[in-house]
Amino acid sequence: MSAYFGVVFGSVEIGLVVAVVISIARLLLFVSRPRTAVKGNIPNTMIYRNTDQYPYSRVVPSLLILEIDAPIYFANAGYLRERITRWIDEEEDRIKASGESSLQYVILDMSAVGNIDTSGISMMEEIKKIMDRRALKLVLANPKGEVVKKLTRSKFVDENLGKEWMFLTVGEAVEACSFMLHTSKTEPASKEEPWNNV
């Protein structure tokens, strides 16, 4: 549409320049403000989907499942840290209001995260510290090979997260967290290992 108006009120060159500039601006906005969403379980399945798109999906008690929908770079690391923290705050407020059992685990679905840089790794370390202070356990689901390599090389996996808290699917992560909740009444930040891991 912008190219059309550029051609009508200017020339073909102006129309193309306007279209390219708007496309680049949209791309930069997407990279700096990636979409994040809360995921819920589709009843009677092992499928987890965005609760806004699937209103009949159900939030799993004591778990917060968040989806990150873009690579984690210096341009969006601060935004993602704030957004994840805000999701946790909102979920804890919702739980207090409803009287449900307290939040114990935060699962990050990283299936759409194709890459991560040093700023992204620092953001993950900050998120882990925030969760440790709140007695929450961070769990990663479906991180890509490149992301796992960088997190391992930076020692985030060994020193902060633990290999036992990375899973191939959200379903496996939910099962492991639910198993830990039902079999152990210890603090979620303990070093107990889940029963099923990558």
Image: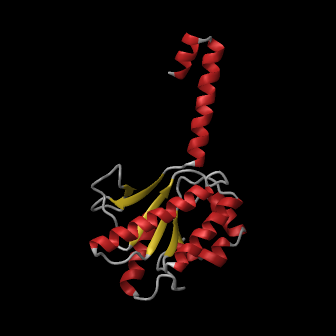
Q: Is residue 57 above or below residue 20?
A: below
Residue at 49% in and 80% down: 135
Q: At which x and y percent is residue 188?
A: 47, 82
Query: For this view, does 70 lie left or right of residue 151?
Result: left
The residue located at (65%, 53%) in the rendering is: 73
Relative height, residue 34 to residue 128 (above, below):
above
Q: Residue at x 63, y 70 (%)?
A: 125
Dividing the picture into quarters, in which one does residue 40 lie?
bottom left
Residue 168 location in percent, x, y?
Answer: 51, 64
Left or right: residue 174 compared with residue 23: left
Left or right of 41 in this view: 9: right
- Residue at image location 46% in from the left, 86% down from the top: 187
Please name whichever residue, 109 or 81, is drawn nearer the observer in this view of the structure.
Answer: 81
Query: Of residues 30 and 195, which is closer to you in this image?
Result: 30
Q: Between residue 103 and residue 178, name the one nearer to us.
A: 103
Along the horizontal axis of the image, is 37 left or right of 161? left
Q: Is residue 169 visible?
A: no
Asked if one can make out residue 88 in the rendered structure from this viewpoint, the answer is yes
Where is residue 192 drawn, in percent x and y? 51, 85
Residue 117 location (% of width, % of height): 69, 57
Quarter of the image that includes the C terminus: bottom right
Q: Quadrant of residue 50?
A: bottom left
Which colour style is shown?
secondary structure
Instruction: Give the mark count.
Output: 0
